[in-house]
Image (cartoon, rainbow, N blue to C red):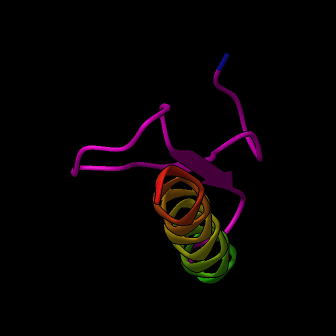
């Protein structure tokens, strides 16, 4: 859906992750913040899996 005021910025992880990693926001600044949060969350999940496997 596209219209005035409906623009959304989307980012998708370009590296291998256990599950799809996607961030979406209304502004570029918000997208950067959401990307950081998603990256940190993904790294924490991978660390939890690594610790759990040991």
Seen at 59% across and 55% down, the residue is 52
Residue at the limit of the structure toward the top, as seen here: 1
Q: Quadrant of residue 17?
A: top left
Q: Nearer the viewer, residue 9 or 43?
A: 43
Q: Which residues are magenta?
A: 2-28
Quadrant housing the N terminus? top right
Q: Nearer the viewer, residue 34 or 19?
A: 19
Seen at 61% across and 62% down, the residue is 48
* Vertical relation: 27 (above or below) 16: below
In percent of width and height, residue 46 lies at 49, 58
Seen at 77% across and 47% down, the residue is 5
14 sits left or right of 47 in the view: left
3 sits left or right of 32 in the view: right
Q: Quadrant of residue 18?
A: top left
Q: Main secondary structure of the magenta part?
A: loop
Q: Nearer the viewer, residue 20 or 10?
A: 20
| 36 magenta-colored | no
In percent of width and height, residue 41 lies at 64, 66
Q: Quadrant of residue 29?
A: bottom right
């Amino acid at each position: 859906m596209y219209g005035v005021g409906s623009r959304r910025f989307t980012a998708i992880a370009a590296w291998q992750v256990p599950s799809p990693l996607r961030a979406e926001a209304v502004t570029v600044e918000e997208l950067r913040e959401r990307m950081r949060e998603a990256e940190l969350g993904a790294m924490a999940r991978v660390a939890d899996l690594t610790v759990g496997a040991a």
